[in-house]
């Protein structure tokens, strides 16, 4: 079933989604890969704030290539999500409601998804140039020294994803 969803979204929206749903996301998504997740975890351990309010947010596991002339971002394909698995449960416990990546997740992540009402979406690997056309704005908001792994705030319009793991424990994997 095709659905259009505005991001950020709350737990009630996440609970309405089922594994296999085709989704088009529009709104704000944050980008963070493993180096940024490590820094965010270190900040939390020091009692510091995260670079953005994680409540009801969706994090896209992606590191863009440089933008070509006239574009806001370069190729924007998903990164393998399992690289974030040691950090993801803590962020979900703080209120994150969505993740976008590719590949299987650990049992600890699945348990945290069920506990917190979180949805895991897959973006199509190898289609980064196509996906970048759905990104209308990109801004580095933290950890600029990490280059492509810096935390970014994206504005997306009809960004195509598939629910591969829903918050009810169902998985296409």
Image: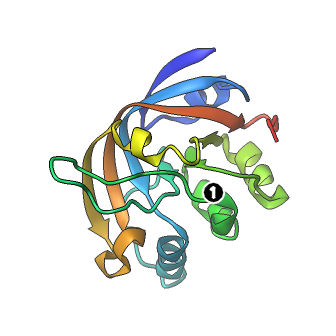
Query: Is 130 on the left-hand or right-hand side of 87?
Result: left
In this view of the protein, which residue sits in the foreground, 69 or 164?
69
Q: Nearer the viewer, residue 126 or 157?
A: 126
* Label 1 element class: helix
Snapshot quadrant of residue 20? top right
User: Which of 37/172 is in front?
Assistant: 172
The N terminus: image quadrant: top right
- Identity of the residue drawn at 59% across and 28% down: 12
User: Is the residue marked by circle 1 packed among few (<14), some (14-19), or many (20+) residues within 10 Å?
Assistant: some
Residue lying furthest top: 1
Q: Is residue 66 left or right of residue 173?
A: left
Residue 115 in the image, given as x and y percentages of width and height:
74, 47
Residue designated by label 1: 93
How many marks are shown on the rendered structure? Answer: 1
Viewer-nearest residue: 163 or 78: 78
Give residue 65's quadrant in the image.
bottom left
Residue at the image position 80 percent from the left and 52 percent from the top: 111
Q: Position of residue 70 (x, y in %)?
A: 15, 47
Q: Work out whether 71 lies above or below 38.
A: above
Q: In the image, what residue occupies the spot 78% across and 50% down?
A: 110
The C terminus lies in quadrant: top right
**Residue appearing at x 46%, y 63% in the figure:** 32
């Amino acid at each position: 079933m095709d659905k259009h969803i505005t991001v950020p979204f709350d737990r009630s929206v996440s609970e309405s989604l089922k594994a296999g749903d085709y989704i088009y996301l529009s709104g704000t998504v944050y980008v963070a890969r493993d180096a940024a997740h490590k820094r965010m975890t270190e900040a939390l351990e020091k009692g510091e704030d995260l670079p953005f309010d994680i409540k009801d947010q969706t994090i896209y596991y992606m590191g863009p290539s440089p933008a070509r002339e006239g574009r806001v971002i370069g190729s924007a394909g998903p990164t393998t999500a399992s690289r974030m698995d040691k950090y993801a449960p803590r962020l979900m416990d703080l209120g994150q409601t969505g993740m976008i990546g590719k590949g299987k997740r650990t049992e600890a992540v699945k348990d945290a998804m069920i506990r917190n009402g979180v949805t895991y979406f897959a973006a199509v690997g190898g289609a980064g140039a196509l996906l970048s056309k759905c990104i209308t704005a990109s801004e580095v908001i933290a950890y600029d020294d990490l280059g492509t792994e810096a935390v970014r705030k994206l504005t997306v319009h009809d960004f195509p994803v598939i629910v591969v793991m829903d918050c009810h424990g169902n998985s296409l994997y």
